[in-house]
Image (spheres, helix red, strand yellow):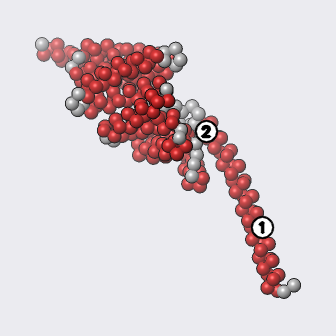
Amino acid sequence: MDTVVLIGVIIGGLALIVTILIHLDNKRRDKRDDKWLEVYSKALDKIPDQITKDTVIQPPENYEQIEQKANELIKRKGYINGWDLLKIGNVEYSKSNYLKAQHYFEVSLDQAKERKERELEAVALGNLSLVFYEKPDFDKAIELSQKAKEINIAIGRKRGYASNLNNLIMIYQERQLGDDLDTALVLFEEAIKIYDSIKEKDVEGRKKGLANLYGNIGLVYKKKGDLKQAMFYYEQSLELHKKTENDFGVASCLGNIGILKRNNNELDEAL
């Protein structure tokens, strides 16, 4: 056999072997990735998908490893489960890492749009609105909450719809431009109707939602100067937070009630 031909055969054979080895290594890595995806999805399972401003999240023990691996998989594969990304964003939001939370919410949102997952899109928009509330960029937060609300109405997702209304009330009472406080009161009546319609289907979720709703509307009445109504809703919120064992919510309500009582005392002294 000619020497040149022999060298060509050898090189061709080596190239084939390398190709096979790379293919086998990729298959082994894909199996490891699939196993890892299953493990971290299970670890994130207890983290809520839809959050509020005051949601308290206890991250899994191996959270840092999960986040690092998730980013590696995004770079290599270009995709991981959008709901898992959303939950990682929720952890970062609860830790007040708002820029990181925004990143995960936006990647999750992009995937939802690409794959036409309307529920994920609505939840990602709602959670993302909270990031802009914290910036604060109230106009953007309202825009995102409105978009989330429209999707939730379209797909019949009442729990999400009510949560979006709750967020809008919170944003309007904080922004306080023009008729914002009156708009918040109108949205409150709308939210109550939604919560009443789901009371048999999601008892625990309804209690948590109403606890936040009453707290937010209490703030609205306080800012409108109706301290009696503010106290009424603070107390309603407090009772529901106690029933759902939300220690953070209880502490927040007690703080609001304490401020209101102090204001009432100062008003009585002035009179």
Label placed on residue 17: 1
Residue 21: quarter of image: bottom right
- Asked whether residue 134 appears in the rendered view, the answer is no
Element class at badge 1: helix
What percent of the width, then of the height, locates residue 4? 79, 85
Q: Is residue 78 left or right of residue 182?
A: right
13 or 46: nearer the viewer: 13
226 or 107: nearer the viewer: 107
Label 2 crowding class (10 Å Cα cut-off): few <14, some 14-19, many 20+? some
- Asked whether residue 123 appears in the rendered view, the answer is yes
Quarter of the C terminus within the rendering:
top left
Residue at image coords 69%, 49%:
32
Q: Nearer the viewer, mark 2 or mark 1?
A: 1
Residue at image coords 22%, 21%:
224
Residue at image coords 38%, 33%:
146
Element class at badge 2: helix
Label placed on residue 41: 2
Amino acid of disc 2: Ser
Residue at image coords 36%, 24%:
252
